[in-house]
Image (tube, rainbow, N blue to C red):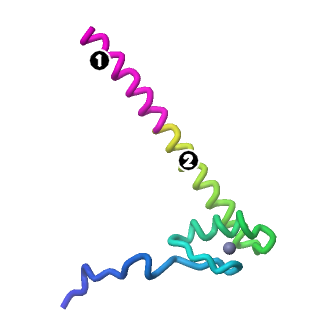
Amino acid sequence: MSYEGTTIPRSDAPAGKCDYCGHPFPTTDRLVLHKGLEHPQQLDDDEEDAFLSAREDEEDELRTLRLKALGALVLLYFGFLMLYAIVA
Ligand SMILES: [Zn+2]
């Protein structure tokens, strides 16, 4: 007997709830970020460390996303330029 494919839906098992306001979060990263942003006074050292590194991760992600968006825009621009050069 195999139980593969009978995974528990994610919404039923949130990664965690905020200790301070009870708000549920789908991932621990989100929870950590929320605690750092909404309850900075209540954080202990471990939570503060987790928040700082989670925020750095997110900033890296944002930077990568922004770079990708810029790259796509430049590609699109040159794509149209080439198209124009060929068609016109
Ligand atoms: Zn909270």
Residue 29 location, x and y as percent? 57, 66
Residue 72, quarter of the rendered image: top left
- Crowd band around label 2 with a 10 angstrom C-alpha radius: few (<14), some (14–19), many (20+): few
Identified at 76% across, 75% down, the residue is 44
- For the N terminus, which image quadrant? bottom left
Q: What label sits on residue 70 in the rendered view? A: none
Placement of 30 over or under 16, stated as above or below: above
Element marked by disc 1? helix
Q: Which residue is mark 1?
A: 83
Residue type, numbered disc 2: Leu
Residue 87 lies left or right of residue 9; in this view the side is: left
Magenta-drawn segment: 69-88
Q: Residue furthest bottom?
A: 1
Front-lying residue, 40 or 57: 40
Q: Which residue is mark 2?
A: 62
The answer to whether residue 71 is magenta is: yes
Placement of 13 over or under 68, stated as above or below: below
Main secondary structure found in the magenta portion:
helix
Q: Quadrant of ligand 1?
A: bottom right
Mark 2 or mark 1, which has the lower sequence index?
2
Residue 20 location, x and y as percent? 71, 79
Does the beta carbon of the residue at mark 2 sit less than 8 Å from ligand 1? no
Identified at 68% across, 78% down, the residue is 21
Residue type, numbered disc 1: Leu
Residue 35 location, x and y as percent? 68, 69
Element marked by disc 2? helix
